[in-house]
Image: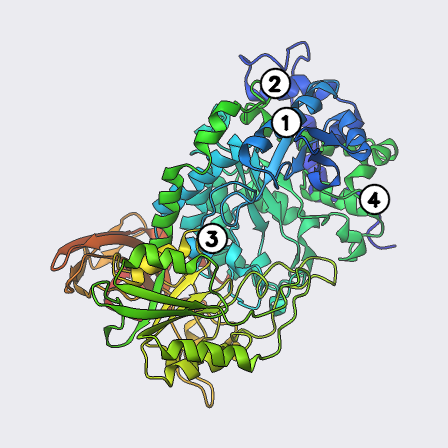
Amino acid sequence: MKKLLFLSLFSAGILMQSCDKKDVTTSKDYKDATLSIEERVEALLPKLSIEEKVAQMRVFHANIGAKPDENGKLKLSKKVIKKLELGIAGIKNPGEHIDAVAAAKLNNELQKYIIEHNRWGIPALFVTESYNGVDAEGCTKFGRPIASAASFNPDLVRRQWDVVGREARLRGMHMCHSPEADIVRDPRFGRMSEAFGEDTYLTTQMVTSAIKGVQGNYEGLGKGTHIGAVAKHFAGYGQVLGGSNFAAIEISERTLIDEVYPPFEAAVKEAKTLGIMASHGDLNGVASHGNPELLTGVLRDQWGFEGYVVSDSNDIARLFYFMNVAESPEAAAQMGLEAGIDIDLYAEDSYAYLPEMVKKNPELEKLIDRSVRRVLRTKFILGLFDNPYINIEDVKAGVRAASSFELAKESDLESIILLKNEENTLPLSKEKAIKVALLGPLLKENTQAMFESIAGNNVKFLAEKGFNLTNERGGAPELLPRDPKAINKLVKTARSADAVVLFLGGDKFTSKEAYFNNSTLGDRATIDPVGPQDELVEKIKALGKPVIVVLKHRRTLSINTIAEQADAILDTWDLSEFGDESTAKIIFGEVSPSGKLPVTVPRTIGQLPYHYSMKEINYKKEYLFLGKGPLFPFGHGLSYGNFEYSNLKVSNAEITPDTELKVTVTVTNKGNVKAKEVVQMYIKDEIGSVTRPDKELKGFEKIELAAGESKTVTFTITPKMLEFTGIAMKKVLEAGDYTVKVGTSSKEYIETTFKLKK
C-alpha cells in the first residue's frame, strides 16, 4: 500500500529535536509582557488542549460568515461562531469590502469577540494580500509589483510597501500573503504581474525591499504600525509548465539553487519575513506541500527560518485528491505536517482531522506543538496579546493620505518605460494649440480628465474607447467579435486629430489567476494582443498622424505590429489609480521616462522559454523566418535625455576569494533635459565547469543628471557574486576570465575584463 501513514526518518529527526526542547515552567504567566517571547510561548502552549492547538493551525476566509450587518456591526454566522470557540490562527480578508475606518471598527469587534470566546484569550491574525496596495476597499492603489520592478528603484519600492504595511495595520490587519518572490519567465502565466519579473538579482532586491517596507524594517511589527509579510510561493511556482496554473514544475536542481532560491533566502535572512507560503505545484515530481527537504531542510535547516509556513489555498488536502501522492485526507494532513506546513489555509478536510489522528498516533502532537509554537510566536512578535486593537482616531488620517497619493504618482513616473520614440515623437508640446485623440479599449472613464489636468488649455482632447476586449465575465471571459463600426468610428475620430494616443494591451480579464475550479481561467496559450488591436493601430497609422501607444497589460505581449507601426510606445504595465495622470506627464514632457523592462519581450511565443540570462549556448541559432533576438531586451528603456557611458574601469585586474573589486563608469547626460537613468552592471563568466549564463545582472543604480552633467557610478564586485553551483552540486568559485558589462540595458553596454585568481 503506497503512502501509508508513517513518520519518515527525516521527520523523526525533527521530532527528536522537538523532544529535546527543555520544558519551561508553566507557572509563568504568558500574559506577562516582561517575559521573553519564547518564555511566553512556552508558558501558554502546555495549557492548550489538542483541539485548541489545532485551531491555532487553521485559517478560514471571512466570506463564510464574518461580515458587517446593514448597520456596520459585526455579524457572525453559526459556522464561524462554532469555529471560534477554540480560538483560531487567523481569518483572511475580514472587512475587505468596506472602507478603512469601518474595517478597523469591524475588526476590533471581531478581535474582541475572538479573545473573549476562547479559554486563553488568544487573538487571531487577520490576513490580507497586496498586488495594487492593500487588497481592500478604501486603501491607496499602487501599481502592481511588475510595474514597481520596472522602476529599478528598491528604495522607492520599500517606501511604497511601507505605506501598504501602515494602511493594512490601521484597518486591523496583521499579515500579508505577499510579496511574491517567484521568478516569472513565462508570459502565458496569468499571475505574471504579481511578481517582480524574470531576473534573480532584480527580484531579490525588490522582494527584500518590499518585506522591509511592509514590516516597518521589522521594528514596526511590535510597535503596531506594520504587518508581517508572507513571501510566496516556495518554490518555483512562477514556472509552471505551459504557463498553466496548477501544472507541474520541472526545474533543474542547479537552476533552483542559483536562480530560484536566492530571493526566498534573502527574504528569510536579510528581510526577516515572518511567513512563507508553499507553492501550489510540485517540484520535479515532489509535491511542495509534502516536501520536507524543501520546507524544513532548505528553509529551516539551511537558512534558519523561524517563522511559520502557511499552505496555499486548500493545498494540503489536495495532496490526496489532486496531487495523488497521499492515500487519504488523513495521510495528506500528516504529509503536510511532517513536511513543515504550520497553517492550513481554508481546508475543512485536512488539519481538521489532526485531533482524531493524535488519538491513534500520539507522536504527532510533538509536530503539532512545533507548528503552534511558530504561530504563537508570530502573534507575540506582532504584540497582539498586549495591544490587539486599532485606535480608530488614527485611521482616517493614516489611510489614503496625500503623501501616499504623491508616492503612488512618483512610483508610476519611475516605472513607465519608453520602448520606442522615432524621430523624437515624444514629448508632445503643451505650448502649441493641438488636438489629441485618446482612443482604444484600455481607455478609462477618467483618462481624458487626467490628461486635461496636465496638458493645459492649448491642447484639446477627443476621447473614444471604441470597444472592449472581452465580455468581462469574471470566471472565463470570452473574446468579443470584431466590431467594424466601432473600429471605423475610432478611425474617424483620429482623422480629425493632430496626434493620436492609443491605449492598447490587456486588462484584468485577459491576464489573471486561474483558480482551481475549471470554470475560472486566467492563463493564455498565446501572447499576442487580443482582439482587433493590431488592425486598429495599422488603420490609425495609415492616416499619417503621429501615433503614440500607451501599453497597459499584466503579462508580456508580443507586440510586433504595434512596435512596427507606432511612432512612440510607452509601456506602463499596470499602474496606480493615478496612472493616466503620470502617463500624461511623460507624454507632455513634465518628466523624462526612466523605467526599464524587468522582462525580455519576445517576438513570438515560439521563442519561449526566453530570458536574457539563458545559457550562452541558447543564443547559438536563431529561427527561420523570424527576426534576430528579442523584440525588446531586458533592461531596455529610453529617455528624453541622451546618456553616454565612458571610462569603464576596474580597480584591479584580478580578484581573489578574499578581495573585492570596484567598478567605476562615467555617465554623461548629453541631452537637453534633466533625466534619470538606470546604470546596469552585468557579469559574464567566460569559461565554467558547467555551462554558464550569457550574462547576469549583478548591480544597478538609478541616477539623475541635469543636461550636460556627468557622474561617476561605482559598483562593488564580491567573490560571492561569482559563485555558482558546480558539477558536484556544491557552490564553487572558479578561477578564470570574467567580463563586466555596464550600460543602459542587457544589450547596450561597454565592457572590460578581470580575472579571478585562487
Which sits in the foreground, 346 or 409? 409
Front disc: 3 or 2: 3
| Residue type marked 2 | Arg
User: Circle 3 sits on which residue?
Assistant: 145
Q: Secondary structure at mark 3?
A: helix
Mark 4–mark 2 Cα distance, whole angstroms, equals 31 Å
User: Circle 2 sits on which residue?
Assistant: 40
Front disc: 1 or 4: 1
| Residue type marked 4 | Glu
Which sits in the foreground, 306 or 491? 491
Mark 4–mark 3 Cα distance, whole angstroms, equals 37 Å
Q: Secondary structure at mark 1?
A: helix
Residue 214 x/y as whole percent: 47, 38
Point out the tag, 1 or 4, that comes first from the N-terminus.
Answer: 4
Point out the tag, 4 or 3, that comes first from the N-terminus.
Answer: 3
Q: Report if the CB atoms under discs 1 and 2 are less than 8 Å apart.
A: yes
